[in-house]
Image (spheres, rainbow, N blue to C red):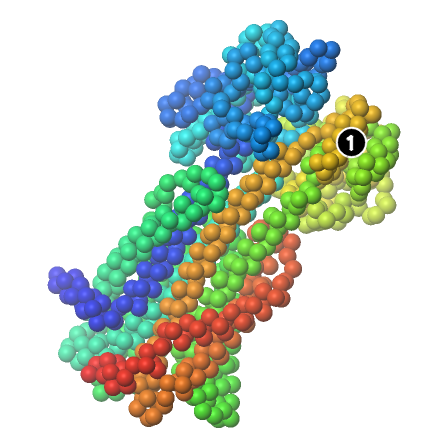
Amino acid sequence: MMRAPLSWRLFRRDLASGELRVLLAALILAVCAVSTVAFVTDRAGRALSQEANRLLGGDAALRGDRPLAPEFLARAAQLGLRHAETRGFNSMVGAGENFSLADVRALGEGFPLRGAFRLVDAAQPDGRIADGVPQPGTLWLSRAGADKLGVRIGDTIQLGDASLVLTELVQAEPDAVLDYFNVAPKVFISLGDLPGTGLEQVGSRIGYRLVVAGEGAAVQAFEDFTRARPARGMRLETAADARPEIRSALDRAEQFLGLSALVAVVLAAVAVAMAARRHSARHLDGVAVMRCLGADQAQIIRLHLLGLAWLGLIGSVLGVLAAFAIQAGLAIWLADALGVSVPAPGLVPAIQGLAVGFAVLAGFAAPPVLALRNTPTLRVIRRDLDAPGAAAWSSGLAGLLALMALLTWQAGSLKLGGLVLAGLLAALIVLAALGFGLVALLRRLRGRLKGPWRYGLANVSRRAGTSVAQIAALGLGLMAILLLTLVRTDLVGRWQAALPADAPNRFLINVQDEQVQPVQEFLQEAGLRGVTLFPMVRGRLVAHNGAPVSGEQFEDERAQRLAEREFNLSFGEPAREDNRLTAGEYWPAGGRGRSEVSVEAGIANRLGWQLGDEVSFDIAGRPFIAEITSLRQVEWESFKPNFFVLAAPGSLDGFPATWISSLHVPADSTAAMNTLVARFPNLSVIDIEAILAQVRGTADQVATAVEYVFYFTLVAGLLVLFAAITASRDERLLEGGVMRVLGANTRQLRLAQLSEFAALGLLSGVTAALGATALSGTIAVQVFDLPWTPDFRLMLSGAVAGVVLVSVFGLIATRKVASAPPADTLRALQGG
């Protein structure tokens, strides 16, 4: 019953005397690093999700081809969600003698719930934010629609039985990114004006839409409610249904944020493991005295484990509180950088921080403390006797199991966690082997050196166990930092390269076979060179391996929609930079007539297609049956025409096809597009400049969030490296005191320390750079689906950084060795 009060008194004594300060500081730092990264990634991730929802007009949207049941609106209201209704349909609109098919959107009050319409304003190049929706009796029109109808602000436009006044031109709309292949001009009216048009009748092809927005839990509850009541012609949409360019950026950002959390866990484990080693070493004398006074092993274990419990509780709570304070400041900067409101912090990151603190302590601090029970009583008179070394294996195994559990939990992805764990284990084995090799080499070479350099390098071989442990710890810490640096560089570089200034901003569609050459010649004359036209055939999926296909066969909503929609098929040679072969083989170059197709790998996985399978499409009432002979990874971010299904040349001969292309049209060449459409009236030119701006803006926001999390994790990593270096400070202080007594001056001690830390840093840095390069390449290809080439400049920089960081931090951590009076140092460390 007295064990808890006694352990508390011992804990307070150790804390007051400095025995626990390093371990407590390492634990607070570890929990703070993990919790802060968790707070920032959680808030940044939710902020990016909300921003992505601006492209949808809300957090979720329920669509149907008939009026939605009142129960859905009632459920949204019951959950406290903001909601708005819209209608969508195609209809003819007229202005004078000009008529055009239009995509009409009837908007309810309050739409959009996320994002906003951006209206054309001559005084503001980026346009101005709309205040609400069109007023009754008025109409908004897209710029392309105004050009096609030849109308201006104030003109009257006929829509069904209603005559509405054009009051605004729309520059960008919230949900345009969902599908930019809708070529009809956009018309926006008030939902209250819809009855007056006479267009909503029995049998009308109208799409009904209920958009909701609110707290994440309430939105999720609404999604679960709607999914539990499936109905034909009804589907639920979220930001995940946006264009592949948007989904790709968000998915990769989420993966990077998960990787940042993994790095924080690794750094935390390194710090606590090294500090725990120092802590247990400093308790050997006290435990030896306790054993001499009659304490048995069980009593020693209970006292020290209770002390660790006090340490874990106090350190974890302080770490979480510090993280909460830090993330509050970071959130302000993040909100300014992203230009969005950052959601309030949740409890999950705090719980994660507390759990990580106790898990790291149990896995990396408890084993060395448990080994204290084996401390020989003879250590009271022989200070060279340590606890039996057999506990090192149990310590390593416990730490490995704890790290495996933490990585799997923090990653949120078994593949990512497994790759990081495998890479770290391989690096640990290599670092340990190289550490032993360095120790053996220096034992042979130290006799050929002179002065402080000889003494410094001799310290590496004299403290063989400590040196190997520090090389492994420093190498893992540096590798984690370099890994994050390399992956972040690949990600940001990919986003910047994917949307360059000259990215395609126009789509050209509906070009007929006989118009391909004249259109290309026109574009050449207009100065728009290098434009490639691609054939496109519309077909509906009807069978897979001879079995009929329907959306009801799939549980995944996106797979259901794919099974029921029309596919855009193409044919030709697939060898393009933005199409990478992942499985199978392409058809022979120049080969024609074979019925084989290449399928985008993501769609194949979602629909359960494999190499050798047979797929059947209905194309204008005629069947097209082909074998899947290859899978491709498509770079959707390129904004070039890409296709889920690509057929071999000649296999689609005789089927109706049109041709499409994407091109970049400079601002001074836009008139050429009007001339092109005038010469070929059946052509459609789709202006995606606003959509491109939305995608580029989302990518910029994602990159900003990645940068902020990266820099914080980098700072946390540097602090953890400092904590790891201090693990051998007591031994260095003792040796420095002895050297000072024997006449060594400050300069000699500094040079000796510098040579030792430089050797440790060089080996750790080189190994970390090689390991981080190999692991980052694996993660880039296997997890992020990014093309990868080794960056030897970063590898060299990592090696140099290892030498510099370890040397600088080492000198700072051991600065007292050269400045403290030798008598004070020896007295403090020897207990007298």
Q: In this view, does 743 lie above or below 278?
A: below
Give how far across and how far down residue 744 sits, in percent: 36, 90
Looking at the rendering, in which quadrant would you find the N terminus?
bottom left
Residue at the left extreme, as displayed: 2
Q: Position of residue 400 (x, y in %)?
A: 42, 64
Badge 1 marks a residue whose secondary structure is helix
Q: Residues within 10 Å of mark 1 (few under 14, many from 20)?
A: some
User: Residue shown at 46%/66% (left/top)?
Assistant: 477
Image coordinates of residue 220 in percent, x first then y, are 43, 33
Residue sticking out furthest to the front? 123
| Relative image position of residue 732 (x, y in whole percent) | 35, 81
Tell me how many marks there are.
Answer: 1
In the displayed structure image, the side of residue 355 where residue 554 appears, left or right: right
Front one among 264 and 610:
264
Q: Quadrant of the C terminus?
A: bottom left
Left or right of 693, for residue 543: right
Residue drawn at x 54%, y 27% is 117
Q: In which quarter of the image is residue 529?
A: top right
Q: Mark 1 points at which residue?
A: 672
Q: Can residue 283 be seen in this view?
A: yes
What residue do we see at 34% from left, 69% from top?
A: 275
- Is residue 631 shown to the viewer in this render? no
Residue 380 placement, left or right of 188: left
Q: Is residue 513 above or below residue 327?
A: above
**For the residue marked with disc 1, what is the amino acid?**
Ala
Q: Which residue is drawn at 87% across and 32% down?
A: 518
